Image (tube, rainbow, N blue to C red):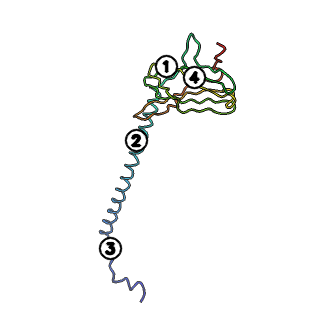
Amino acid sequence: MSSVTFFANKKGVSPLIATVLLIAFAVALGAVIMNWGRGFVQDQTANVEQTTEVEVGCALDVQLKVSEIGGTPQLCYGGSSTEGYFEFTLDNQGRKDVKEIGIIIHGQKAIYQNSTLNNSLIIAGGAHYRNLSFNFDTYGDVKYVRFIPKIDISGVTTPCSGSSLQKDAAEIRNCSSS
């Protein structure tokens, strides 16, 4: 008995039922993809909103500047060897309080980083003075200093790297030469 004669008396699925099954499968598959897509779009929207809030908040609400007294910038270094130091006064000319300040001092030998200077709150429109110990033996001569403000955005202390203030070595005076 050949396979052709074996299936000769069997009936297949009618074209109408096959069409209904294909449509049902396509609808079910579409529903699964739509639910996945909705979750994906919502996640991406939340990420974009958060990033936008940070970028706009930092750009509009933060503006650090080195204070000046009599035209003299209040950013200097002093001492030598392990007894080195930096003195600086920063103005917050932005609309929001700067909750914390991070500092990076790029030296000839190494990089000094302090992500949060203690008690570094600068209220909007206010100023902050600081004296910071610095080891010239470890870090070498200074190439630049960068101050990174951190503000409160939706209850989270957020660094505003795009609003950081950087001063090159040529812009930093020796405290004892004034």
Mark 1–mark 3 distance (CA, rounded to whole Å): 82 Å
Say which residue label 3 marks: 13
Mark 2–mark 3 distance (CA, rounded to whole Å): 48 Å
Mark 3 crowd level (few <14, some 14–19, many ≥20, 10 Å Cα)? few
Numbered disc 1: secondary structure: strand
Say which residue label 1 marks: 127
Numbered disc 4: secondary structure: strand
Residue 141 is left or right of residue 161, and the answer is: right
Say which residue label 4 marks: 131
- Furthest toward the top, the residue is 70
Q: Amino acid under label 4?
A: Asn
Nearer-the-camera pick, 67 or 37: 67
Numbered disc 2: secondary structure: helix
Mark 2 crowd level (few <14, some 14–19, many ≥20, 10 Å Cα)? few
Q: Which quadrant of the view contains residue 171? A: top right
**Can you say whether 86 is above or below 42 in the image?**
above
Say which residue label 2 marks: 46
Mark 3–mark 4 distance (CA, rounded to whole Å): 86 Å
Q: Amino acid under label 1?
A: Ala
Q: Along the polypeptide, which appears first: circle 2 or circle 3?
A: 3
Nearer-the-camera pick, 40 or 13: 40
- Residue 132 pos. (x, y %): 58, 25
